Image (cartoon, rainbow, N blue to C red):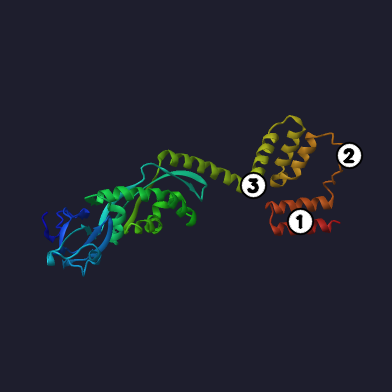
Amino acid sequence: MALIDCVKFDCPVDDVLVWKYPSENLTLGTQLIVNQSQEAVFVKGGKALDVFGPGTHTLSTGNLPFLQKLINLPFGGKTPFTAEVWFVNKTVKRGLKWGTQGPVQVMDPIYMYPVNLRAFGEWGLRVTNSQAFINQMVGTQLLADSAKIEEYFRGEILQRLTDQLAKFVVEQNVSVFQLAAKTNDLSSFVQNAISPEFNRFGIEIVNFNVARTSIADEDMQQFQKIQAQRMQLSVINQSGQAYATMRSFDTLEAAAQNPNGNMGQMLGAGLGMGVGLSSGMAVGQQVGNTMNPNPPQNSVPQPSADDPMAKLQKLKQLLEMGLISSSDFETKKQEILSSL
């Protein structure tokens, strides 16, 4: 059994996050050399026990307390023992890619419309707790690089991303169609939410970034079509009485142009005399009487058009419809009252 006098790891590439020294046959007095941005972790029985930072260390029972219960000293200062040595690279790994493999359905809280959303970005990581990382991530692998770590944690990111996208648009009251302008806020929101899971593995998320979000073309086209319809309905609803009045006048004008029948003659005379806007109420009532020449016997008799109360009621209706000004209303009201 060859005994090792010097243990070190000079990594030829920067992608390697953790590396196991190939031999487990060590002796007290062996030199352990740990480079900058590295930590060396001693593993015994599958459990990480001691961690050494950068520098040169001479292995002894003083700095490896777990050995005191495992070995005797028949070999003097060169007592052999077995243990695994793992070197952990603690530099920041940037530019790791992530992206949704398929669309994620999110309900837009503003328009109440389901949208199929995709998201893409980059992230970085750094090992902050070498013991936790070795115990939970490495297992029996001889080599673990950023590609393997990225593959594992990409799944962790995407698993939580769906919930975080939905929470963000609801809590921030942001439309899915406005996310392109909120990528910085969204990035921080998602990073804060998923960091605790990474911390459990001894890993810190660095520079998590949502680079862009995208909506399927067919979803965008369908939304634009529905939104256009909603806007048309909104305009109609907001116009309310004005829209109904305009339609009434269109009907009245068409009837007035028909010379046949009493209705045409009456409306033609009324519109021709400049009854104009006031016809909306007065002529409307006359139209109703014309279309129903035989009212029910129990119907309440309507006041005469010359009745002062009827005139005041019509005048008030014109004011409420915005067809006359307040000053016009007061002037006409005084005229009616003066005639009493």
Q: Position of residue 71 (x, y in %)?
A: 20, 63
- Dot placed on the residue nearer the N-terminal end, 2 or 3: 3
The reply to whether discs 2 and 1 touch (Cβ–Cβ < 8 Å) is: no
Q: Please tell me the numbered disc located at residue 298.
A: 2
Q: Position of residue 271 (x, y in %)?
A: 70, 41
Q: Distance between the residues labelled 1 and 3?
A: 27 Å
For mark 3, does the 10 Å Cα neighbourhood hold few (<14), some (14 to 19), or many (20 or more) residues? few
Q: Nearer the observer, disc 1 or disc 3?
A: 3
Whether residue 191 can be seen here: no
> Disc 1 on helix, strand or loop?
helix
Q: Which residue lies furthest to the bottom in this view?
A: 62
Query: Which one is nearer the viewer's eye here, 222 or 292?
Result: 222
For mark 2, does the 10 Å Cα neighbourhood hold few (<14), some (14 to 19), or many (20 or more) residues? few
Q: Residue furthest top?
A: 260
Amino acid, disc 3 = Gly
- Which image quarter holds the C terminus? bottom right
> Disc 2 on helix, strand or loop?
loop
Q: Please tell me the numbered disc located at residue 177.
A: none
Q: Distance between the residues labelled 2 and 3?
A: 33 Å
Q: Where is residue 100 in the image (x, y as percent from the top left)?
A: 36, 45
| 188 with respect to 29 (left or right) | right
For mark 1, does the 10 Å Cα neighbourhood hold few (<14), some (14 to 19), or many (20 or more) residues? some
Amino acid, disc 1 = Lys
For the point 27% across and 48% down, the residue is: 148
- Which image quarter holds the N terminus? bottom left
Q: Name the residue under label 1.
A: 332
Query: Which one is nearer the viewer's eye here, 266 or 56?
Result: 56
Q: Name the residue under label 3.
A: 240
For the point 69% across and 38% down, the residue is: 252
> Disc 3 on helix, strand or loop?
loop
Q: How far apart are marks 2 and 1 (CA)?
A: 34 Å
Whether residue 2 can be seen here: yes
